[in-house]
Image: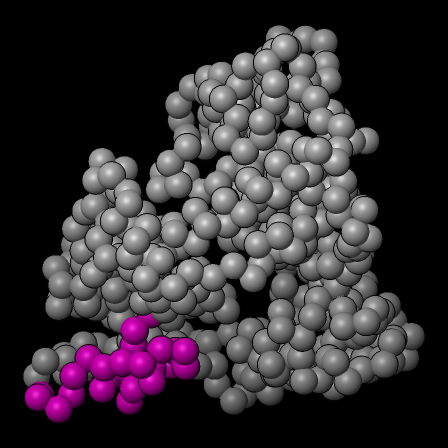
Amino acid sequence: MLIWTQRVFISTLALTSLANLGLPQTSQPMRIDEVVAVVGNEIILLSEVEENARQMALQTDRPVGFKEKCQILEGLLFQKLCLEQAERDSLTVTDEQVESELNRRLDYFKAQFESVEKMEQVLGRTIPEIKKEFRAQVKDQLLIRQMEEKITGQVKVTPAEVRRFYESVPPDSLPYIPSEVELAHIVVEPKPSAAEKENVRRKLQEIRREILQGASFGLKALLYSEDKISAKNQGELGFMTREQLVPEFASVAFRLKEGEVSEIVETPFGFHLIQLIERRGEYYNFRHILLRPKPSEADFQRAEKLIDSIYHLIGRHDTLTFGKLAELFSTDEETRNNEGRLVNPATGTTRFRVSDLDMPTFNIVNRLEPGEYSSPELFETPTGYKAFRIVKLLHRTQPHLADLQNDFETIRDAALEHKKKAIIDRWIQKKQKEYFIRVNSTFRECPFDSFKFNSP
């Protein structure tokens, strides 16, 4: 198994998101299920292997053969072994951790759809139903993650190890790096008037007054909150830590007593009322009602006029560079002090794979050459508001084989996984002597990478 082309499979299976959500179900002939492997008190069913194979085929758009099913089974063997060892080591996962992880994963899937309603329609289940269905699976995955962290969490690689690893890889096994881009933007978000913000405050204050007089917070959230995701659950956000919430929200919410209703709180998303439902350690469960001030047509016209003026200033004066104009005028606080440069949240770098860009950004970047910038366009900000932006393509790499100079992070990650895999291999070989592990005849001839079985 090439570490370059595929992360250690026994690791990735343990850490997958709710990957089968949203994928179409295919009609398959009925067959009798059977136990294909046993790890201690845990069993692996043929249906588990087949379902993972089906998901792999849908995601890779190519047939899944016996070799791939063996990889899947090896991943499941590792998962079950981790669960057995986690029980022996008394590792635990709290309900709050499970709820937080479910929320995190669902947030990812929500972003793939136009609305929560559309997501629920496609999946054929409501969010509470999805949570109920996957709760046990996510709990197991968190235990597996803990166990894997216990095995390899302290592993590091030095620059010298990265270089030796790179030099040891045959040229035909080097990863092919797709095209990547670095981007900057200037954002001008129409700001609602003071009168509009005051109208929203008054409306929210009236809702708060009615709640304090005995009205149901949950019912008010269901009726009025503009956070459509939580509104369907009567404003409930689920258990979260402080780090998962914007600072303006957290600074008020985490001072509340159970059942207490906050004063009005302003965040980049709008105005909120917050109620603490329950606290469990560092995890808190809140309800909130969100109302959003709406910019008027005149507000949009002013913003459009400003972004057009900025567009015509770019490159007209030596001192007014794109970065300087971003610093002076951009309303995106995360990028304005970094010359408008966007940072990839998944990697922490300024590089984005072209294939990972959202479609509106891809369409802009696709027609630009490095150093060029787009004309002003309307887009939706991460907070859900409409705004204008100018996008500049700073740099574009061509697809290429990985090399140390340009792709050190990619090679370092591969070297780290290679080192971790060696440690996991040794751990598995040790644990195979401590646990009863058997694979049935269907998969006994599998070319397993880490697990070693005697031929029958």
Image: 293 above or below 24:
below
- Tell me the residue at 73%/59% (across/down): 97
- Magenta segment, which residues? 317-342
Q: How is the image coloured?
A: one colour
Q: Quadrant of residue 326?
A: bottom left
- Tell me the residue at 39%/23% (across/down): 62
Residue 288 is left or right of residue 148, and the answer is right
Q: Position of residue 18 (x, y in %)?
A: 60, 42
Nearer to the camera, 342 or 381? 342
Say if the magenta span includes residue 323: yes
Say if the magenta span includes residue 222: no
- Tell me the residue at 38%/64% (across/down): 158
Residue 302 is left or right of residue 119, and the answer is left
Image: 439 above or below 236:
above
Q: Position of residue 257 (x, y in %)?
A: 85, 81
Residue 2 is left or right of residue 273, and the answer is left
